[in-house]
């Protein structure tokens, strides 16, 4: 007796959600800013976020009943996009200016490097090299067009500006601490952005003015979500996107949580490699998908592990301490409460220890307790008086995709905002070039993508009621001093 043939295995039929104009993948500041821009123009928006909360790398946790970012944040005077957003949401009065100090840890010594005289006192360099270091910043500031530097590495440019000894003492350890094995491949444009940005935030005396929002990024996220809710945005957390659907005409839908979300357009705000994986399935059948996937996988990323300490006394009076010692496991020691008042955190002194590294590195894979225990002897070496009893609590946060590696000629590898798959748009930290990642550029990138999408949907102008909701307000902190975007 011949057995009956087995029925063909069919793909499960997905239950479809109500269609919307735009689905946004990711509820970091890029996705939230894009949702605000689109919804303000009358576009129907749904935001899908895999995590249980919103904010991305600016998401928060509690310290003594106060919200604090998992990864350190501050704003510069030139961060006009996010300062303008604070004004639009009615929280500009919570933006506070702080004078901060910068230092460098080198050869078991902490050196101040906030003012011009600090550079002249920097003993690890001969006096002539100290002069070169000071002049380097001035020469870097004269570069107005970053395209002049796009085909050079940071090492080539910095050596040309300040000499080999200055590079070996000051810049090589910072690049290697930040980018590891990629240090020699980092583009000059990345370093120019850092020097240009920090130079623009200094006072005439050399002190650095930074801005921080009272209540932290959580206050901004809360105000933003409230506005999005008023505008009817469908914001869903705990909704991981599995794939994108596209046919020969273009993108058709997003699959998340086993459900189909049909949309006319989709904005993906993840890292490029994550976006490429969303296109890997058989449901993405548009002919432009294979080439787009290859391009997205060209952009390399580093992960970050961040140890946050709640101390009962401060380590130093420096806010930002660059580490130029390859034996110290972190590239920066950022003492947050040397900027913000420790009284706001129950009198605790908050310290971030940050390290960029491959996601398969030992430090990244350690348990939270192992990270803490591993870090203690290094802290004792840097701060000889430090003792374990100073630490009342600690937290460890990880981000697999934290820092894109910007190489010479990056514009040729940078993912497009509007892809060749009709209806599919990309916006994220890999596309803020020549600037580096940050919440200001996340807001700018999200709004830029949203404006383009609205144009293609036939909604070129914002809803006229937006200005009525925003209303007049005082100038945003810093906007009256430096208008326009940081370029």
Image (cartoon, rainbow, N blue to C red):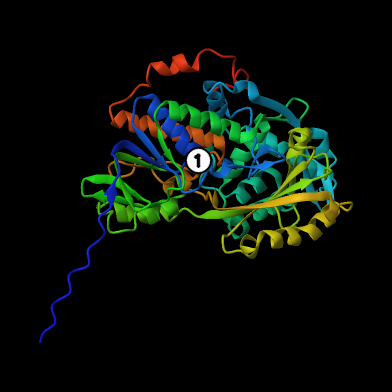
Left or right, residue 95 beside residue 185: right
Q: Is residue 168 visible?
A: yes
Left or right, residue 221 beside residue 128: left
Question: Crowdedness of circle 1 by 10 Å Cα count: few (<14), some, many (20+)?
Answer: many
Q: Residue shown at 84%/57% (left/top)?
A: 381
Residue 72 coordinates in the image, percent (x, y): 65, 42
Residue at far left of view:
1
Residue 301 coordinates in the image, percent (x, y): 52, 54
Say which of 262 and 294 sits in front. 262
Image position of 447 with respect to 92: above or below = below
Quadrant where the C terminus is found in the figure: top right
Residue topped by disc 1: 28
Q: Residue shown at 54%/38% (left/top)?
A: 435
Say which of 341 and 424 sits in front. 341
Residue at far bottom of view:
1
| Mark 1 residue element | loop
Residue 317 coordinates in the image, percent (x, y): 82, 39
Based on the displayed image, in which of its 4 quarters is residue 139 positioned?
Answer: top right
Based on the displayed image, in which of its 4 quarters is residue 372 positioned?
Answer: bottom right
Residue at far top of view:
472
Quadrant where the N terminus is found in the figure: bottom left
Residue 169 coordinates in the image, percent (x, y): 75, 51
> How many numbered circles are shown?
1
Image position of 211 with respect to 270: above or below = above
Residue at far right of view:
385
Say which of 300 and 248 sits in front. 248
Left or right, residue 252 beside residue 370: left
């Amino acid at each position: 007796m011949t057995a009956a043939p087995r029925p063909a295995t069919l793909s499960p039929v997905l239950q479809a959600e109500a269609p919307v104009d735009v689905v946004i993948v990711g509820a970091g500041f890029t996705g939230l800013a894009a949702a605000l821009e689109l919804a303000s123009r009358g576009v129907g928006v749904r935001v899908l976020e895999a995590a249980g909360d919103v904010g991305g790398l600016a998401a928060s946790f509690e310290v003594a009943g106060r919200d604090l970012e998992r990864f350190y944040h501050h704003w510069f005077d030139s961060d006009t996009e996010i300062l303008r957003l604070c004004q639009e949401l009615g929280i500009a009065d919570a933006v506070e200016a702080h004078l901060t100090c910068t230092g460098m840890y080198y050869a078991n010594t902490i050196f101040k490097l906030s003012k011009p005289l600090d550079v002249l006192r920097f003993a690890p360099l001969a006096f002539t090299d100290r002069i070169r270091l000071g002049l380097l910043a001035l020469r870097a500031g004269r570069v107005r067009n970053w395209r002049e530097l796009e085909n050079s590495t940071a090492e080539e440019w910095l050596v040309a500006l300040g000499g080999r000894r200055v590079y070996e003492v000051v810049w090589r350890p910072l690049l290697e601490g930040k980018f590891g094995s990629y240090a020699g491949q980092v583009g000059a444009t990345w370093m120019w952005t850092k020097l240009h940005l920090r130079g623009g935030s200094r006072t005439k005396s050399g002190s650095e003015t930074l801005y921080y929002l009272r209540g932290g990024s959580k206050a901004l996220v809360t105000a933003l979500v409230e506005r999005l809710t008023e505008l009817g945005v469908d914001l869903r957390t705990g909704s991981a996107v599995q794939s994108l659907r596209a046919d020969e005409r273009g993108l058709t839908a997003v699959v998340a949580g086993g459900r189909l979300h049909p949309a006319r357009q989709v904005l993906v705000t993840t890292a490029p490699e994550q976006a490429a994986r969303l296109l890997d399935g058989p449901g993405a059948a548009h002919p432009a998908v294979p080439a787009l996937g290859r391009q997205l996988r060209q952009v390399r990323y580093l992960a970050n592990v961040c140890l946050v300490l709640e101390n009962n006394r401060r380590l130093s009076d420096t806010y930002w301490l660059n580490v130029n010692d390859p034996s110290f496991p972190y590239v920066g020691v950022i003492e947050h409460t040397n900027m913000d008042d420790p009284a706001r955190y129950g009198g605790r002194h908050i310290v971030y220890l940050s390290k960029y590294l491959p996601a398969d590195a030992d430090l990244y894979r350690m348990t939270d307790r192992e990270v803490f225990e591993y870090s203690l002897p290094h802290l004792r070496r840097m701060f000889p008086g430090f003792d374990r009893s100073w630490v009342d609590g600690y937290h460890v946060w990880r981000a697999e995709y934290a820092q894109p590696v910007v190489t010479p000629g990056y514009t040729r590898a940078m993912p497009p905002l509007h892809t060749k798959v009709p209806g599919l748009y990309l916006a994220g930290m890999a596309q803020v070039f020549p600037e580096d990642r940050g919440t200001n550029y996340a807001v700018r990138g999200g709004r830029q993508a949203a404006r383009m999408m609205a144009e293609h949907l036939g909604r070129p102008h914002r809803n006229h009621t937006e200005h009525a909701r925003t209303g007049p307000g005082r100038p945003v902190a810093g906007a009256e001093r430096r208008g326009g975007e940081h370029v």
